Image (cartoon, rainbow, N blue to C red):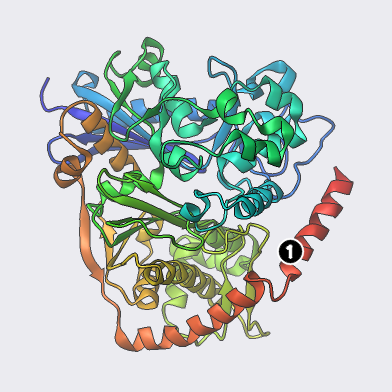
């Protein structure tokens, strides 16, 4: 062996990517990406499972678990080839996943959708993080917890999300009891992929705490669950509870089968599973108190460490050691960011912009960003709400929807595009101000993920937040973070903190707020806040009514 290497694999919403990293200094030697063959199933199940051409109801988002195994088969060997690495030098593998992404399985981990009797049942498939159809169940969980004054509810900002484990499981019980009855394990995909690599099911402490309502050593009581639904009382003991693995620890060794998939050596260390956002904090050397890390891709997840336990309204959770040991890890998020920009480019931009982008050799995103960057702040006369995928924080309401105010016949595509960029920054500012008001300081904003490549977006965020904006030094922050955890699991570094110092990468203070821009954005943010509270805090229920109408029409079509 020359210098030891590790592999980090990041499973995103549309693809998985692998990176080969040197343990000594975090140098990324090679990487590869593999797109999921089935992508996101939000209209129908894949052929031939689709019965009678039925479409999926609104707010559904499913995936096919075999697509994740294909990432191991294709992206890992390709990354090794790209790095020119000898697989014998790789000492460990780490993985991260979107969350909360769930799959019902048999006792041996077989997804129910892979069984012939359930291939046509949507509830047997992976429920992606952005599957929001369990909102009614989430509302009932929140209401009952508030009524019973459950001590765990304030740890989640007083609201339980439709994206999380209990709401989605209750949805399965109530809409597909046959699937629920056959399900032996309700598994986070962060743990399922490690199960495929090691042959051992280990539940990671991160998703258990943030998505599984695991606080102070336990889950919601059986009595609480029975009040939700008499058939739900045994959910924890029968389908969820499992020994927890700590972050950075070894889940097991690579199986012979997984070694054949990946081209790696049987028996090397596989780290306990983790979440894309949480592994990115160490990758960006931003695991200290006050450093808010935003992993900006199709959605944005915000993670932040604090020295004290605080109750923050509308957050996604606070977990002792949820990011690194010894600190309280806070999480918040926005359900749509890059997805919103992509939706607009695909469905709202006239053909002439696409033609011009091709002529210039640019993407449409780059063209719109370049045109929008020529504008003064407020010149477009627009303000938008970034709720096209609902609101994760701080309202925790996925029945909300997007809004653009101020459009006229003079409005052009670049105007709307810039307003959408700004809306996501305003949503992040709402989260930051909520943390600060609750006594959790935010002193630095660290951006990671694919969207850091857009300088206009980064400039907008620095000015809207009035904070120094640092940028992750890696274009593959989550994959690097998973590699860092793999190095710890393999015994190459004594702790995640030590591995972060040796292997992490960040460019500090790349964007500094410009005072006149800050002042201009303060005025626009005041308008955003007025719309946010009017439509999001119950003054006007039109968004909810429209969602109800859409559901009823779609139900009649299915």
Give the image quarter of residue 131. Answer: top right
Regarding residue 476, the answer to whether it shows in the image is no
Residue 336 left/right relative to 270:
right
Residue at point 33%, 17% (across, down): 254
Q: Is residue 392 above or below residue 127?
A: below
* Number of disc labels: 1
Q: Is residue 522 above or below residue 148?
A: below
Q: Secondary structure at mark 1?
A: helix
The image quadrant where one finds the C terminus is top right
Q: Residues within 10 Å of mark 1 (few under 14, many from 20)?
A: some
| Nearer to the camera, 549 or 453 | 549
The image quadrant where one finds the N terminus is top left
Residue at point 57%, 53% (across, down): 149
Give the image quarter of residue 95. Answer: top left
Give the image quarter of residue 492. Answer: top left
Q: Position of residue 74 (x, y in %)?
A: 42, 27
The furthest residue to the right:
556
Residue that carries the numbered disc 1 in the rendered image: 544
Q: Position of residue 411 (x, y in %)?
A: 61, 82
Q: Position of residue 13 (x, y in %)?
A: 51, 43
Regarding residue 353, the answer to whether it shows in the image is yes
Residue 51 left/right relative to 310:
right
């Amino acid at each position: 062996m020359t210098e030891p290497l590790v592999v980090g694999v990041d499973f995103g919403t549309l693809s998985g990517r692998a990176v080969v990293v040197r343990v000594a200094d975090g140098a990324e030697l090679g990487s590869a990406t593999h797109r999921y063959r089935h992508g996101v199933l939000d209209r129908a199940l894949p052929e031939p499972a689709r019965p009678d051409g039925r479409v999926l109801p609104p707010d559904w988002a499913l995936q096919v678990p075999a697509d994740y195994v294909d990432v191991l088969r294709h992206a890992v060997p390709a990354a090794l080839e790209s790095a020119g690495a000898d697989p014998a030098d790789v000492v460990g593998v780490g993985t991260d996943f979107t969350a909360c992404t769930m799959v019902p399985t048999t006792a041996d981990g077989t997804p129910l959708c892979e069984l012939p009797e359930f291939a046509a049942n949507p509830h047997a498939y992976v429920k992606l993080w952005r599957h929001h159809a369990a909102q009614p169940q989430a509302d009932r969980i929140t209401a009952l917890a508030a009524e019973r004054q459950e001590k765990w509810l304030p740890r989640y900002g007083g609201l339980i999300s439709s994206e999380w484990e209990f709401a989605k499981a209750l949805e399965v019980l109530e809409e597909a009891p046959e699937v629920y009855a056959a399900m032996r394990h309700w598994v986070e995909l962060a743990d399922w992929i490690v199960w495929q690599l090691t042959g051992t099911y280990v539940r990671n402490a991160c998703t258990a705490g943030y998505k599984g309502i695991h606080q102070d050593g336990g889950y919601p009581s059986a009595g609480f669950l029975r009040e939700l639904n008499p058939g739900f009382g045994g959910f924890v003991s029968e389908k969820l509870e499992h020994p927890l693995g700590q972050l950075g620890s070894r889940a097991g060794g690579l199986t012979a089968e997984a070694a054949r998939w990946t081209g790696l050596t049987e028996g090397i260390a596989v780290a306990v599973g983790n979440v894309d956002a949480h592994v990115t904090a160490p990758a960006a050397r931003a695991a200290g108190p006050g450093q808010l890390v935003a992993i900006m891709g199709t959605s944005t997840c915000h993670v932040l460490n604090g020295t004290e336990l605080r109750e923050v309204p509308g957050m996604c959770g606070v977990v002792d050691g949820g990011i690194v040991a010894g600190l309280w890890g806070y999480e918040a998020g926005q359900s749509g960011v890059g997805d919103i920009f992509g939706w607009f480019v695909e469905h709202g931009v006239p053909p002439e912009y696409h033609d011009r982008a091709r002529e210039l050799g640019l993407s449409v995103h780059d063209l719109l960003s370049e045109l929008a960057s020529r504008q003064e702040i407020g010149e477009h006369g627009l303000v938008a709400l970034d709720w096209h995928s609902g609101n994760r924080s701080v309202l925790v309401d996925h029945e909300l929807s997007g809004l653009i105010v101020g459009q006229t016949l003079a409005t052009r595509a670049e105007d709307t595009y810039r307003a959408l960029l700004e809306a996501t920054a305003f949503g992040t500012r709402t989260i930051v101000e909520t943390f600060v008001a609750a006594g959790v300081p935010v002193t630095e904003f660290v951006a990671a993920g694919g969207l850091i490549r857009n300088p206009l977006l980064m400039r907008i965020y620095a000015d809207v937040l009035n904070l120094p904006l640092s940028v992750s030094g890696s274009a593959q922050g989550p994959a690097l973070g998973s590699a860092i955890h793999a190095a710890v699991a393999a015994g190459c570094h004594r702790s995640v903190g030590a591995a972060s110092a040796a292997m992490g990468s960040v460019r500090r203070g790349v964007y500094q707020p410009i005072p006149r821009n800050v002042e201009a954005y303060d005025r626009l943010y005041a308008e955003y806040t007025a719309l946010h509270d009017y439509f999001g805090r119950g003054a006007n229920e039109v968004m909810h009514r429209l969602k109800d109408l859409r559901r009823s029409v779609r139900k009649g079509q299915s």
